[in-house]
Amino acid sequence: MSDYKELEYENGWRGTPPTISGLPAIFGRWYYVNPSLGKSGASGLEPYDPMDSIATAYAACSDGKGDGICLISYGTGATADTTSYLSTTLTWSKSDITVFGLGAPVRYGKRTRVTNKSTATTLTPLMTVSGTNNAFYNVQFTNFASDASVVQCVVVTGNRNYFENCDFFMGGGGVNVATASSLYVNGAQECMFKNCTIGGDTVDQGSGVVSGVISLAGGVERCWFENCDVLSYFTGGSNVAGAIIVGSAGAGITRNVVFSRCRFMNYVTGSPEGSAGCSELVVGTAPNNGIILLHDCAQIGFAATSAFTQRVYVACGPTQVAGGAIAVKSA
């Protein structure tokens, strides 16, 4: 990687070799990814010898050894400078890996991105996180694969995974089909999503099918969403399209799933309520065991919270629910 080394290292490296200051503490080694200047044959062990993609770096990480991946956003914002492309679904089955997006930590549209290659038109999902104890910071995951079969962006099945200031957006060909979702949590336990943006308001998801932004299925329990923005663009008034969809024939949730200080915003033109938006925020199949707690949340573009009056509780939240700070069943 002599060209990159000459330009950035020998003439004055802008970071602190061989590591970059401010990265989270890890036990193992860092692998650096620069989609603009990296190469598949690079070691990735130093910022001036970066790998080309997050998939290459993931392959180099050891399972359960505390390694890390630093995804570098480089240049002036061109797509090739800021995006790591995937040609196949990235199955994240390893555990104890930290991923840090080195770029501006904005809330929407961050430029440390992972998405599908333009030739990968049937990628669904973009990534499956089946390992445990992984942490992701400041990374945007988008799936724009165009085939109608594309229904998911990120699937989380592993336990105790952590996402902070991450984006999840499924904007591909199957946005208005059953089970379509930007974040699909299936059987995962004790996962946390903090300061994340889930979904988007630029692709019309239509209405009339059981679809949502976040899908909970397979016995999800004790997962926590804190200070997240959940965005959607449902133009119809069907009550089967909502921000949260619960599946698995009543066993989608066991124990509890908490949404604390989250904002559910459905983009509509005209009136934000009634037929111009979505009938309910939580749809699908009523859980027969666990509960959803909406603590100090806000909603726009949803006429009601949920018909699951025995399983959805609200505290300090939407105006249509009385009770102040006391948790009450959804009206």
Image: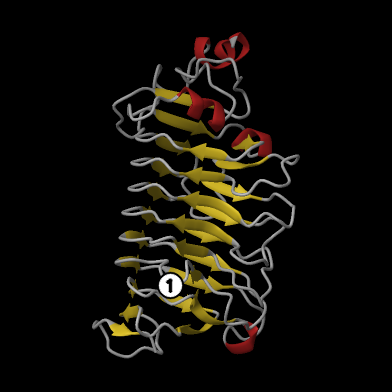
Q: Is residue 146 above or below residue 229?
A: above
Task: Kindly identify which residue carries mark 1.
Answer: 250
Q: Where residue 217 appears, x then y in whole percent?
A: 45, 62
Q: Is residue 139 at least partly visible in the picture?
A: no
Q: Is residue 150 at least partly visible in the picture?
A: yes
Q: Where residue 325 appears, x then y in whole percent?
A: 24, 82
Q: Is residue 109 above or below residue 21?
A: below
Number of numbered markers: 1
Task: Quadrant for residue 241, please give it.
Answer: bottom right
Element under disc 1: loop
Q: Where residue 329 appears, x then y in whole percent?
A: 33, 85
Residue at x 60% of width, y 30% of height: 35
Q: Quadrant of the N terminus?
A: top right
Task: Quadrant for residue 322, please give it.
Answer: bottom left
Residue nearest the observer in this picture, 12 or 46: 46
Q: Where residue 119 appears, x then y in whole percent?
A: 76, 39
Left or right of 78? Residue 163 is left
Outermost residue, front direction?
249
Q: Quadrant of the C terminus?
A: bottom left
Q: Is residue 14 above or below residue 248?
A: above
Crowdedness near tag 1: few (<14), some (14–19) or many (≥20) residues, C-alpha within 10 Å: some
Residue nearest the observer in this picture, 247 or 191: 247
Coloration mode: secondary structure
Q: Tell me the amino acid under the disc marked 1.
A: Gly
Q: Is residue 217 above or below residue 26?
A: below
Task: Quadrant for residue 134, please give it.
Answer: top left
Residue at x 45% of width, y 85% of height: 307
Residue at x 37% of width, y 35% of height: 95
Left or right of 99? Residue 275 is right
Residue at x 58% of width, y 55% of height: 169
